[in-house]
Image (spheres, rainbow, N blue to C red):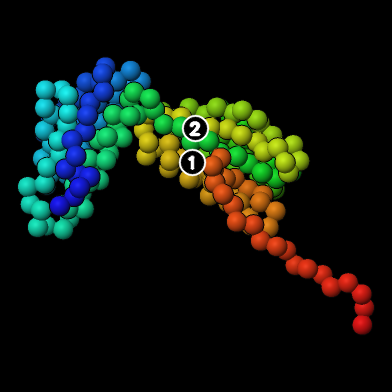
Amino acid sequence: MSRIGNKPVDVPKGVKVEHAKNTVKVTGPLGTLQFAYDPCLTVKVEDGKSVIVTNPQPEVRRNRELHGTTRALIANMMVGVTTGYKKSLEIYGTGYGVKEQGGKLVLTVGFAHTVELPIPKGVKVTIEVAATRGNEVPAKFSLASMDKCLVAQFASDIRKVKPPEPYKGKGIRYADERLRRKVGKAFASGGA
C-alpha cells in the first residue's frame, strides 16, 4: 500500500478541479494544467475540496508504482496553478554569459560557438546578471512555470550543456547546488 498515494490532495481556494474519463484538469489563478492518468487507477473529486487517488488492484506491481506517482503529480498541479515553480541557475567562468534572443536561450560557455536552446512554451526566463565578472560573480538567471516537470527538465537540459567541473568550478549549476572541489596537480619544486 502506498502511503503517499492514499493521502487526499487538498484543493486550495480559487482552484477548480474537473474530472472526465482518465483526465484531471486543474484551473487556478496562473492558468490551467491537464493530466491523463493510467486507467488502472481511480480518481475521485470530493465536493471540489479534495482529490482522492485509489488503487483497486494493490496486488499488481505496476499499479502500486503508479499510485503514489499519480497522487504526487496531481498535488504538483495544485501548487503549480496557485504559486508556480521556479528554478535558479548560475554560470561560473570568465567570459561566460547568457541572453534571451528570439525565443531561444543563448549560452556562451567557453565553446567556439554559442549554444542556443529553444525556450519551451509556458516557461518564463528571467536574467538577473547576464555575464560573469571574473570567477567570483556568476551570471544568474531563473526559470519559472506552473508545470514542475517542464521547468525541471529545461533546467536539466541547460545544465547538461556545460556541467560544473570539479577543479575550478566552471560551468552551469543550480543556485543551491553544492560542488565538491578537487585539488589540482601539485608540482614538485627544485631539481634533482
Q: In the rendered image, which quarter contains the C terminus?
A: bottom right
Classify 10 Å Cα crowding around label 2: few (below 14), some (14-19), many (20 and above).
some
Residue 107 is situated, as x and y percent measured from the top left of the image, at 62, 39
Q: How many marks?
A: 2
- Image quadrant where residue 187 sits: bottom right
Identify residue for label 1. 155
Instruction: Tell me the crowding category of disc 1: few under 14, some 14 to 19, or many 20 or more residues within 10 angstroms, Cα based.
Output: many
16 shown above or below 105 = above
Which x, y percent locates residue 6?
Answer: 16, 43
Residue in view at x 29 percent, y 31 percent: 77
In the rendered structure, find residue 190 and report the number of the disc placed on it. none
In the displayed structure, would residue 66 be above or below residue 32?
Answer: below
Kind of residue sitting beneath label 1: Ala
Say which amino acid is labelled 2.
Answer: Leu
**Observer able to see residue 114:** no
Q: Tell which residue pokes out farthest to the right in this image.
A: 191
Q: Secondary structure at mark 1?
A: helix
93 and 192: which is toward the camera? 192
Residue at image location 46% in from the left, 40% down from the top: 154
Q: Nearer the viewer, residue 27 or 176?
A: 176
For residue 69, say whether it is visible. Answer: yes
Query: Quick one: which residue is furthest to the bottom in this view?
Result: 192
Q: Are marks 1 and 2 in contact (CB under 8 Å)?
A: yes
Q: Earlier in the sequence, mark 1 or mark 2?
A: 2
Which residue lies under the disc numbered 2?
143
* Residue at 15% from the left image edge and 52% from the top image edge: 1
The quadrant holding residue 84 is: top left
- Could you say where residue 74 lies in the image, as x and y percent from the top left? 25, 35
Q: Secondary structure at mark 2?
A: strand
Horizontally, residue 51 falls left or right of residue 138, namely left
Residue at figure coordinates x 37%, y 36% from the top left: 148
Residue 145 in the image, given as x and y percentages of width and height: 42, 29
